[in-house]
Amino acid sequence: MNEIKIFSPATVANVSCGYDVLGFCLDTIGDEMVVRKTKEKGVKITKIVGATLPFETNKNVAGVAALAILEAAKAEFGVEIEIYKNIKPGSGVGSSSASASGTVFAINELLGKPFDKQQLTLFGMKGEAIASGVEHADNVAPGIFGGFTLVKSIQPLKIVELPTPSELYATIIHPQIEIKTSEARGILPYKIELSNAIKQWANVGSLISGLYTSNYELIADSLHDHIIEPYRSQLIPYFKEVHDVVLENGALGCGISGSGPSIFSLCKGNTIAHKVADAMHDVYSKTGIKFDVYVSKINTEGVKIID
Amino acid sequence: MNEIKIFSPATVANVSCGYDVLGFCLDTIGDEMVVRKTKEKGVKITKIVGATLPFETNKNVAGVAALAILEAAKAEFGVEIEIYKNIKPGSGVGSSSASASGTVFAINELLGKPFDKQQLTLFGMKGEAIASGVEHADNVAPGIFGGFTLVKSIQPLKIVELPTPSELYATIIHPQIEIKTSEARGILPYKIELSNAIKQWANVGSLISGLYTSNYELIADSLHDHIIEPYRSQLIPYFKEVHDVVLENGALGCGISGSGPSIFSLCKGNTIAHKVADAMHDVYSKTGIKFDVYVSKINTEGVKIID
């Protein structure tokens, strides 16, 4: 195989109660990438469509991720990468992570699959670090593994794959405002109340139990964030309006996707997910802020080959 | 049925990472109780063997729990209760909770089982509150449900039953020292670092995933407490020595049982559990402190009828 075309999906990190550890993978929104072997070693970004991103390998998430995996494999070839961005940078649904995950998945295929998903996540994180300043895996892992993932630890990296109930859908609204990751991080407290932390880990526990048992009621009851959302939701206009109307329309839960500004909801079934999408649409169409709304089944496959 | 004899097991609350929410049920250590219908309404504690506890109904955990369930059922009868304590009060393995759980289970049987386990937990908590000052369920729930339980919330009470891997054993050492619950609570900080809380909820998540998948390695990797143990372990002499030697002998993990002074470990299989018991024994036999050591399979049944 000398060339591969892949679809690299958007992902939702944190998932209300699971700040910094939980994430899940979307289906209907994602980037496409073409990765081509070259005789000359090294990595060239040859095309970027849909976003303004650096072509210099060392400054590009895909470039850095590609170098990491090629070096680890001691590859005898180089690659050219074409990136077709559909996920807007800064949207909060893992745009940079999709570039990283897609790249390492594609190159692993070109190499004959020497690496497992855990290792691919590690290479992807190298790329992700260029965008966010720190190596984190809460978007890369669900992109590579698909479904729901738990990042148990970063050093050493340990990813736990979680099951996905079959009727679970996500609805996402992306308000086109900019939230700097540094601001979203800076707004968080260094210390939190023990009593709130207890609520949070009870919810993480019951959410995961709900995923294993396809208990949608328990999932709904667990999708609360007592720690992060009170701070970060201030950065997202109309968050409370969206949150409330989404629950009124039957969503299981609603929260900030990653560090925002996108807002996600989880729903049981496609019908409710679309009803929730309409409700999100109604709130934002009155605001003058540009936005996109997506409905997606939870994607249990992760990055995949297309064409 | 006019009289019932039951076994009410000891329980381990917190389970390292799951402070205030997780608990599991033991098998080889527990109280016995006889509960007998009386024509006269009300509750009489007629016998207490093995511990010095109040006979006044309103001051006795079993008495208060009995009144709660009889009142809720609008029972046309009263009860006499005989308590045979094998679980030492103040040991940290749910002594008061066993009295409460056993009582409400027994009376529910005498009533013809009108209440489910969740409701029984609520009545048991009323009794537990007499002993600890607050209504909590992290010992009552595993006693009534058996196996592992997650107390998702107290108000309203929501208990999540978790699965128990078949080869899971616990080893417990009870050093016969007194730790006041007020001291064990008072030593805890009001606020904790967000970074530590993240580690804790990652561990709660992966422990629960490990229980669902019988992944003993993941269970072992999750049994860490970054929040409570650093404080409370100071109240338990030789905690670190026990902790270290237990892990050297193959235990999956080791932590404080409830608010102590008992120390629990979880092990894969009976053989390792007994090796761990010997190791605990060796540490404490050099200290001059009286102690007991127990090995128990995780009890998936909870309170049960005997004879």
Image (cartoon, coloured by chain):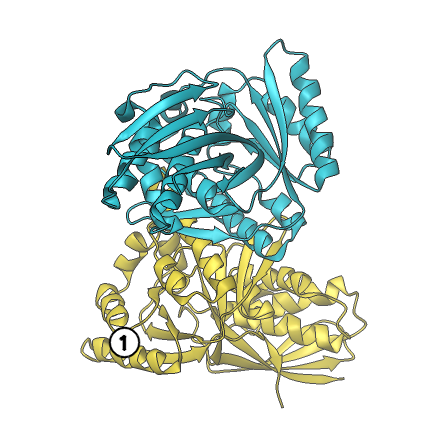
Chain colours: A cyan, B yellow
Q: Residue furthest right?
A: B76
Answer with the quarter of the image where residue B34 lies: bottom right
Q: Residue furthest top?
A: A288
Q: Where does the image place residue A237, in percent across and percent down from the top left? A: 56, 17
Q: Which residue is at the front of the view, B13 or B45?
A: B13
For the N terminus of chain B, which image quadrant? bottom right
Q: Which residue is at the front of the view, B190 or B283?
A: B283
Q: Where does the image place residue B189, in percent across and percent down from the top left? A: 35, 44
| Residue ID for mark 1 | B280
Q: Is residue A41 above or below residue B88?
A: above
Determine if residue B32 is in view: yes
Q: Is residue A241 above or below residue A103?
A: above
Determine if residue A17 is in view: no
Task: Report the residue at 65% width, 73% height from top.
Answer: B105
At label 1, the amino acid type is Met
Answer with the quarter of the image where residue B163 lies: bottom right
Q: Where does the image place residue B86, in percent across and percent down from the top left? A: 46, 81
Q: Where does the image place residue A12, in percent across and percent down from the top left? A: 51, 35
Mark 1 secondary-structure assignment: helix
Q: Which residue is at the front of the view, A152 or B94?
A: A152
Q: Residue furthest left?
A: B286
Answer with the quarter of the image where residue B300 lies: bottom right
For the C terminus of chain B, which image quadrant? bottom right
Q: Is residue A53 above or below residue B33?
A: above
Task: Report the residue at 34% width, 74% height from top.
Answer: B173
Task: Report the residue at 37% width, 34% height from top.
Answer: A36
Task: Report the residue at 35% width, 38% height from top.
Answer: A124
Q: Is residue B128 left or right of residue A280?
A: left
